[in-house]
Amino acid sequence: MSTPTTIHTTLRAEGFSCPSCVAKIEKSLSKVGGVSAATVHFASSRIEVDHDPAVATPEDLVAAVAAAGYTARPSAF
């Protein structure tokens, strides 16, 4: 049995304008299987997610943000 691998993915968010949006996005991401941590940086519109890529892909993370009512895309920084 292999050990789960955790990677760090950064997303750029669009469309959130209030600090309460942060909690909504973090809650949505935390429900995704394979996600071990999710942090939204309101001031820089960055979302940082630690996850198992075999369980949760970057596309899954973007979909979770979309389900919360916001737009995000993978980012290199």
Image (cartoon, rainbow, N blue to C red):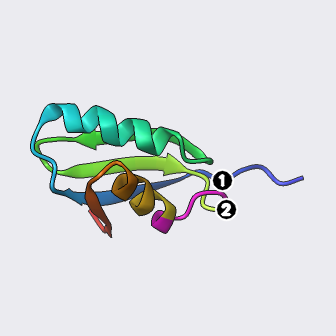
Residue 54 numbered mark, or none: 2
Relative image position of residue 33 (x, y in whole percent): 62, 47
Contact (Cβ within 8 Å) of mark 1 with mark 2: yes
- Front-most of residues 62 and 68: 68
Residue drawn at x 15%, y 55% as measured from the top left = 15
Q: Which residues are magenta?
A: 54-59
- Tell me which amino acid carries mark 2: Ala
Look at the image and say whether residue 58 sits in the magenta stretch: yes
Residue drawn at x 30%, y 49% as measured from the top left = 47
Relative image position of residue 20 (x, y in whole percent): 20, 31
Q: Which residue is labeled 1 in the image?
A: 5
Q: Is residue 67 left or right of residue 16?
A: right
Going from N to C along the chain, the mark reached first, 1 or 2, is: 1
Q: Residue furthest right?
A: 1
Task: Report, in whole angstroms, how far the alpha carbon at label 1 lies from the one at label 2.
Answer: 8 Å
Residue 57 numbered mark, or none: none
Q: Is residue 16 left or right of residue 4?
A: left
Q: Residues within 10 Å of mark 1 (few under 14, many from 20)?
A: few
- Front-most of residues 22 and 4: 22
Relative image position of residue 48 (x, y in whole percent): 35, 48
Q: Quadrant of residue 55?
A: bottom right
